[in-house]
Image (cartoon, rainbow, N blue to C red):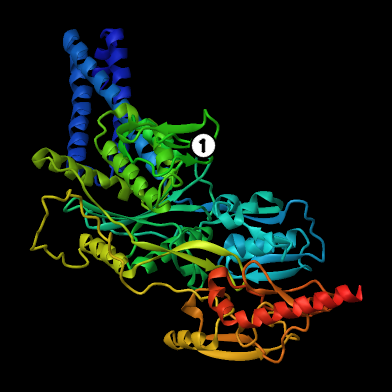
Amino acid sequence: MKVLFNKLKKTNKIFLIIYLITLIAYTVTYILLIKNLMSLTGIETAIRIILIIIFGIWLVAYFLWNLINLILKRWITIAITTAITIIFAIVFSFANYYISILYNGISNIGEKEYIIYTSNLVVLNGTTIDEESTLGMINNSDDIEGNVLAKELMEKENLNENQVEEYSSYYEMIFDLLNGEVDGIFLNSNYQTIFGSEESFEELKNTTILYTYSKEMENQDITLTSNKSLTEPFTILLMGVDSEMDGLNANASFNGDTLMLITFNPKTLNATMFSIPRDTYVPIACNNNRYAKINSSAAYGTSCVIDTVEEFTDITIDYYVKINFKGVVDLVDALGGIEVDIEAPDFNYNHGVNCGGRFCEQNSDRDTSASGMIYLDPGLQTINGEEALAYARCRHLYLQSDIDRNRHQQQVVEAIAKKAASLDSLSKIEEILNAVTKNITTNMSSDQILSFYDVLKSMVSSSLKDGSFLTIEKTYLEYYNLPVRLSNNGTFTSAIGYYPDSLNAIIKLMKENLELEPHEMIKTFSFDANEEYTTKVTGQGITTGTKLETMPNFVGKSMSEVETWASSHNITLQTEFVDNTSSYYNPNITPGLIANQSVSDGILLNNVTTLTVYINSISSTPETPTTPNEEGNKEPTETDDNKDDEENTDTDNPLDVILPTEDENKENNSESSESTTETKEEETKTENQSKQEG
């Protein structure tokens, strides 16, 4: 060894220094390369090991061979091998950089172990809270923001002496706040985004957060994991968050604006996409299976959405991806745009703007000024990020509103997937990862995400072999309008019901793709040369199965009609005759007909077993003369006696008087025409007497 050092001292110092620096640089970058290559679990394992061995051999060879060359003064050989080694080190550096970006980016889109939960005391503008104020709170102890933190906020702000009204539904609680039944309610930070889009809750914009309380807690969704291998059929629930901010907020609740259930079979490269309309009325799993719009489950967090969708479809969800749709802008731009066939709009006006037959929608900042609107001509074209988001958000220009929007979102997702799979430029990876990591959260582990490489490789191989790439089967859930009351005598909300057989057809298709059910081969085929061929959409055109029903309005109807209905629906009917001393008495209804009912019209029948109807007693006709109103109902005249009656009927009335509509009164009007005539004669006689006395 001493002889070796003595010989190295006599060699060229410049070549020796270059040799040592190159050796160190190569060794460091090689060690980092080993670390990064080993992190790419499941990606070309054999190739990664072979590369590590080859470059390891080169390291040993360079170290020993050039050591000898230095002693033997073979300068040309040293120069060539050093140049090659430096090139390897540079390549290693670039590889390490991109692998680190890829792996760190993938790691960052997983659920965080701890996140911030927030509860706010929300009041109407100008409202103050004192010891006499009544506060509304969700009664579910599993609701972190609506219950657990709400109680801690009350403790913090010394509100424990206040009366608390408990609710099973956010909708009922917000309705009572806006109608002055409670002075303040506890909501999460996203309440404006989650509930403000409801037509019934537009007045939420006139509310203020009086107190707020945030706490970093263990993520309730961190347990939502799956060990399902991506080499076998799997499911993904895509949850779109319609936010005006770039990036996902680190809390549980969100606006479930888009729900898309996707199944994928890596063996056949076949996918199914089922967009669930956001207003679909279903049991909410985490709220004692009470019926509500399916997007309302997002107010309780990701786990509630998943449980609700699983119960709705009877399909286990392996993975979920929560994406902020504002991040679509950055992602599509990073991909260099996507190709989408823009559907021609059915209407001309959107947000009060005349689109002139073109597609138009607010930009990502929801700006409706001339410069803020996005305009597109119908037809196939390449669109940028702002245009893609606008198309995915728009519903007011199309006849089927949310249903059409779901279909457009499927188009955008499909276009993004195809463009991403065909990406061949490393320069865009960093830009794409930046767009993805801050706007996406998933329960997939880093290793599971990396295993998508094998899926993409299969797609490319299949594409080169027979031209096929990825088959995506779309679905369509047939629906019907279902206006329902949120609570007894509460406000109506415009939900939609679905046809069970249409849903069953979609579920069957998805289970076949997951290989949970055998695929039934179609053995017959027919066509008509005079009809344009269209691709079959599973679920479309199927309008059979038992529909959801709501309680009808029986006010002004006869008992025979109610008895027939109650018998056909297996509902126990109870009757009670009331006079004008009862709070259920209705002075606008003819004696002998139904004056009121215990369950309001519009209430879903699923949990209704008994109905009590209140009938105006024949012996309790109003003492004051009446005149027909515009609807055809009889309405008391303004007399002192009548005012006293109104005061009596308004006292402690547990059920608001429900007035029948014009259509509902047609039968009542015909039956009571004789009574109305007599009343008019009495009114005329009374008026003449008054004039004579005058």
Q: Nearer the viewer, residue 132 or 54?
A: 132
Instruction: Point out residue 64 in the picture as x, y percentages from the top left corner.
Output: 20, 23
Residue pushed farthest right? Answer: 694
Q: Residue at horizontal 29%, vertical 11%?
A: 9
Q: Report the side of 207 relative to 597 (left or right).
A: right
Name above or below for residue 408 compared with residue 355.
below
> Dot 1 corresponds to which residue?
353
Asked if residue 97 shows in the view, the reply is: yes
| Image quarter in which the N terminus is found | top left
Which class describes the residues within 10 Å of circle 1: few (<14), some (14-19), or many (20+)? some
Query: Where is 420 relative to 668, above or below?
Result: above
User: Can see residue 596?
Assistant: no
Amino acid at circle 1: Val
Q: Judge whether 265 appears above or below 48 on screen.
A: below
Q: Position of residue 306 (x, y in %)?
A: 41, 62
Q: Nearer the viewer, residue 624 or 357?
A: 624
For label 1, the SS is strand
